[in-house]
Amino acid sequence: MLNVQSNLRFFNLNQLLPFSVYPLHSNSRQFHTKTLTNKRVGPHNIDIISVLVGCLLGDAYSSKSKNLTGGSSFRFKQSGRHKDYLFFLYDLFFLRGYCTDSGPRLYKTILVNSANVKKIYFGYEFDLFTFSSLNWMYDLFYLNGKKIISPEISKFLTPMALAFLIMDDGGWVSGSKSVRIATNNFTLQEVELLRDIFKIKFDLDCTIQLLSKGGGNRPKDKYSLYFKVASLPKLRELVLPFMIPSMKYKLGL
């Protein structure tokens, strides 16, 4: 059983407001670098929990210290194209005391294609402080060091979390006039679970499409999740209050 009640005791998961009206964290700027990991205890506002859940379903990732007094850290990373979104994320966490004032770091990635042609990509990333009080979040998303989708995620998947998932790892498909979620790192069973959670929690209908078959250099089948066109108006109604202007194109706007 995941012990999260102590961190969420002040908040009603069913009463979410648009991000702009959330107050700063009650401990704003108190999670500074001189604070020990096991002293950064929260409580963590539901906006922070929602952002973490949405981003961890997307491109963000986490690691947990193996020592008994250690905690979990979280990293956020986006390509240069999505710099505005990454810096928005940084400001969100910085103003609530979750990271240093050093700002996002520029990184470079070099990829070599099958024709042995190198391509260089730039992006930005930043890390949160390490929190023992967020170890439960790591345990929610990881099993034996591998990111998973578990049924327990349903408890924390709010409209705000869904908005950050779309901003983090969603895309607009102009041909089919639908929104795609890049779930290609999850198993078919996990993608089916996420589809069912969207239906049960938000009455959103999705389809699953096979992107590529495993075999050869591809270790497994890859799948994407698509919101059906009929669900697009409801999806927009749910997530638009939480999306920044530069990301609204992912909803076809």
Image (spheres, rainbow, N blue to C red):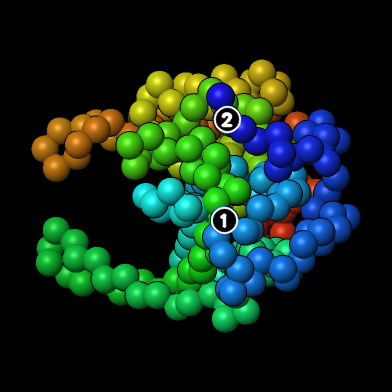
**Residue 34 point in image, percent of width and height:** 59, 74
Secondary structure beneath dot 2 equals loop
Secondary structure beneath dot 1 equals helix
On screen, residue 22 versus residue 60, left or right, reads right
In the picture as drawn, the residue positioned furthest to the front comes out as: 68
In the picture as drawn, the residue positioned furthest to the bottom comes out as: 102
Q: Which mark is residue 239?
A: none
Residue that label 1 marks: 38
Q: What residue is at 53 percent from the left and 27 percent from the top?
A: 194
> What amino acid is found at the position of numbered circle 2 in the picture?
Leu
Q: Earlier in the sequence, mark 2 or mark 1?
A: 2
**Residue 213 point in image, percent of width and height:** 24, 31
**Residue 53 point in image, percent of width and height:** 59, 43
In this view, 225 is above or below 69 = above
Front tag of 2 and 1: 1
> What amino acid is found at the position of numbered circle 1 in the picture?
Asn
Residue closest to the eye, 182 or 11:
11
In this view, 80 is above or below 132 = below
Mark 2 near mark 1, Cβ–Cβ under 8 Å?
no
**Residue 234 point in image, percent of width and height:** 75, 31
Q: What residue is at 55 percent from the left and 60 percent from the top?
A: 37
On screen, residue 32 versus residue 1, left or right, reads right
Quarter of the image for residue 2 reads top right
Residue that label 2 marks: 2
User: What is the quadrant of the N terminus in the image?
Assistant: top right
Can residue 173 be seen from the camera position used here? no
Quarter of the image for residue 151 reads top right
Q: How many marks?
A: 2
Can residue 9 be seen from the camera position used here? yes
On screen, residue 99 versus residue 119, left or right, reads right
